[in-house]
Image: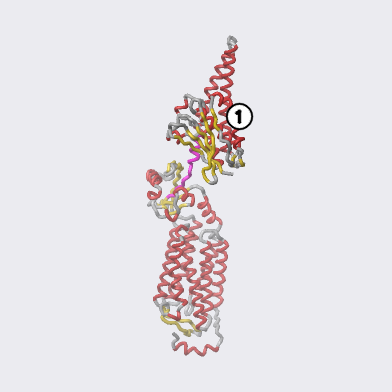
């Protein structure tokens, strides 16, 4: 491809191959500043965009280095090698530009593997052309050495491949700049200046490069683009030190948004979801990539209807039940207002209060239950104490009054014991689970319940041996007491209660209590393990406070087991709980 200009310059081959000019140190300074910016950006990870910013700066450094070593050398083959180095750096800088912007403006959901691969297609195709410059004229129609003002230059005639790369580069830079400029309207003052200065960086680099490509050449034989990196690097340093680019506040904003346990959605005026945090993914059961850009009505109709009703209110708080699972959330909506005091969207925060509401419901039920169950024995005791003041009572009447007072006190003590056990189960964090001697646990249970079993003339059927399981013996004893108590109390006449165990899964054992009572319907079984609840058909005929099965449920939840009941509604019930196998 060498033309007669190269032959005219053949006499240069015997001269020194380097042609240093006063501009050389300026290009060298651009390289050093770009590398410095790259190192500083890398050290500021994991701030949003810091990694991409650093890699982009490395690309600019390589670009400058390739131009420096190529321009100030007179050997054609050397210049061709440096052209490849120069374009490698330029392509890295361009490739990491959009990922930097997207990450910096907190839209990382767009940076999927697919997006990164799509952004790499054009740089890879272009670089293959650069590597094969000698084999085709698609990128450069021709290239040769020329002399201008005593400098030997690498001159080339651009072709369609080059212009395709320039178009891709400029579109990339312009799209990223528009995204940054848009952020100026809704970001805090400190961050607005960051966006503005980054866009200024792009303009400083883009305009001289566009003039050079167009053939206007404002600096004569020199490509002004690497020289602009000096000014761009200085502005980058100002960004890093003065305006805290990637500093603690942006990091804190990112980490708080990412790690806060409440769901946070950023929604525009068209009710489209623009941003959401990981906690929101748990609420919706979908990832950000599945949700971003969708409307609230598509993703969360319950929330959409609610926001539509409250659209005229500025800030508001309320509660909402979201399907599936009937989870209860407190909703807080806060308008997003730009510098012109115009509402451009809303921040919606969802605080899950399902457990809190359940606890409040339990406390209300507890207050009602305790007041009801303690009032009756207390009133009875007061009445009998008043009777005891009457000296006209016979010995038998006085003994009967003492027995009634004792039974009432025993009932109140059982309620208090159950409440203390419930409190212990709910508050204890670490439960010491150990291998259980279930035979010994059952012996303790039957000893405690001996008078009760005798009173009901109940028959208890035990297995010959028990499988070994892990658990906390004092709590497991309470589980058996509650299950056997119910089997005896609600069993047949006389009650026959069978207890046993079988292996449910490889690492699970199911323990069960089967009675010969009337059985339960599905609706009754669904409500049995709710706190402070007793079945209506038994409320009048038997004593109790509705705490037993709810305690069982909480115990097994703490031990990592399950509880349940099976019944066909006719031939008794089988209550069960599961434990891990030793």
| Neighbours of disc 1 within 10 Å: few (<14), some (14-19), many (20+) | few
Query: Residue 239, percent across and down?
Result: 53, 62
Quadrant showing the C terminus? top right
Q: Is residue 372 visible?
A: no
- The residue range painted magenta reads 346-362
Image position of 515 (left or right of 388): left
Position of residue 402 relative to residue 358, above or below, is above
Query: Residue 308, percent across and down?
Result: 37, 45
| Quadrant of res 214 | bottom left
The residue lying toward the viewer, choosing from 33 and 373, is 373
Coloured how? secondary structure
Q: Is residue 356 visible?
A: yes
Report if residue 306 lies within the magenta region: no
| Quadrant of res 395 | top right
Q: Secondary structure at mark 1?
A: helix
Quadrant showing the N terminus? bottom left
Single out the residue that lies furthest toward the front.
Answer: 464
Image position of 357 (left or right of 468): left
Query: Residue 249, percent across and down?
Result: 54, 55
Residue at horizontal 48%, vertical 80%?
221
Query: Residue 49, percent across and down?
Result: 51, 61
Position of residue 379 relative to residue 68, above or below, is above
- Count how many numbered circles sit on residues in the image: 1
The residue lying toward the viewer, choosing from 35 and 222, is 35
Position of residue 478 relative to residue 286, above or below, is above
Residue hosting label 1? 447
């Amino acid at each position: 491809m060498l033309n007669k200009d190269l032959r005219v310059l053949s006499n240069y081959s015997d001269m020194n191959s380097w042609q240093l000019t006063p501009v050389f140190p300026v290009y060298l300074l651009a390289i050093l500043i770009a590398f410095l910016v790259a190192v500083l950006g890398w050290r500021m990870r994991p701030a949003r965009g810091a990694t991409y910013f650093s890699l982009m700066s490395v690309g600019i450094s390589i670009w400058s280095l390739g131009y420096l070593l190529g321009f100030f050398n007179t050997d054609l083959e050397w210049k061709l090698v440096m052209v490849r180095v120069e374009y490698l750096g330029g392509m890295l800088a361009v490739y990491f530009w959009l990922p930097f912007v997207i990450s910096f403006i907190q839209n990382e959901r767009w940076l999927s593997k697919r997006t990164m691969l799509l952004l790499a297609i054009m740089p890879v195709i272009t670089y293959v052309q650069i590597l094969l410059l000698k084999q085709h004229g698609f990128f450069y129609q021709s290239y040769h050495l020329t002399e201008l003002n005593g400098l030997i230059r690498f001159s080339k005639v651009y072709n369609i491949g080059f212009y395709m790369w320039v178009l891709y580069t400029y579109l990339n830079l312009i799209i990223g700049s528009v995204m940054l400029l848009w952020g100026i309207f809704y970001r805090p003052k400190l961050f607005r200046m960051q966006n503005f200065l980054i866009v200024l960086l792009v303009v400083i680099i883009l305009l001289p490069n566009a003039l050079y490509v167009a053939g206007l050449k404002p600096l004569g034989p020199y490509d002004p683009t690497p020289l602009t990196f000096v000014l761009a690097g200085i502005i980058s340093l100002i960004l890093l030190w003065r305006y805290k680019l990637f500093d603690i506040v942006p990091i804190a904003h990112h980490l708080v948004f990412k790690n806060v346990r409440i769901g946070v959605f950023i929604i525009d005026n068209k009710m489209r979801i623009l941003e959401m945090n990981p906690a929101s993914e748990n609420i919706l059961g979908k990832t950000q990539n599945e949700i971003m850009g969708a409307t609230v009505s598509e993703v969360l109709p319950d929330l959409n209807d609610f926001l539509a009703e409250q659209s005229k209110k500025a800030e508001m708080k309320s509660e909402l039940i979201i399907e599936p699972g009937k989870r209860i959330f407190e909703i807080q909506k806060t308008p997003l207002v730009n510098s012109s005091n115009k509402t451009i969207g809303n921040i919606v925060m969802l605080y899950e209060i399902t457990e809190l509401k359940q606890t409040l419901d339990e406390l209300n039920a507890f207050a009602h239950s305790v007041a009801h169950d303690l009032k009756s024995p207390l009133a009875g005791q007061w009445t009998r104490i008043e009777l005891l003041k009457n000296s006209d009572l016979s010995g038998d009447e006085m003994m009967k009054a003492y027995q009634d007072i004792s039974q009432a006190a025993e009932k109140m003590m059982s309620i208090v014991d159950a409440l203390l056990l419930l409190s212990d189960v709910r508050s204890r964090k670490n439960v010491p689970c150990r291998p259980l001697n279930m035979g010994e646990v059952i012996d303790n249970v039957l000893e405690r319940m001996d008078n009760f079993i005798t009173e009901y003339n109940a028959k208890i059927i035990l297995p010959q041996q028990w499988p070994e399981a892990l658990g906390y013996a004092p709590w497991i004893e309470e589980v058996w007491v509650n299950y056997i108590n119910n089997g005896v109390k609600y069993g047949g006449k006389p009650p026959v209660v069978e207890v046993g165990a079988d292996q449910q899964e490889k690492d699970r054992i199911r323990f069960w209590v089967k009675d010969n009572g009337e059985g339960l319907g599905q609706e009754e079984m669904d409500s049995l393990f709710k706190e402070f609840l007793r079945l209506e058909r038994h409320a009048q005929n038997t004593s109790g406070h509705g705490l037993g099965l709810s305690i069982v449920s909480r115990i097994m939840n703490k031990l990592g087991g399950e509880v349940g009941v099976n019944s066909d509604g006719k031939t008794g019930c089988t209550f069960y709980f599961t434990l891990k196998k030793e």
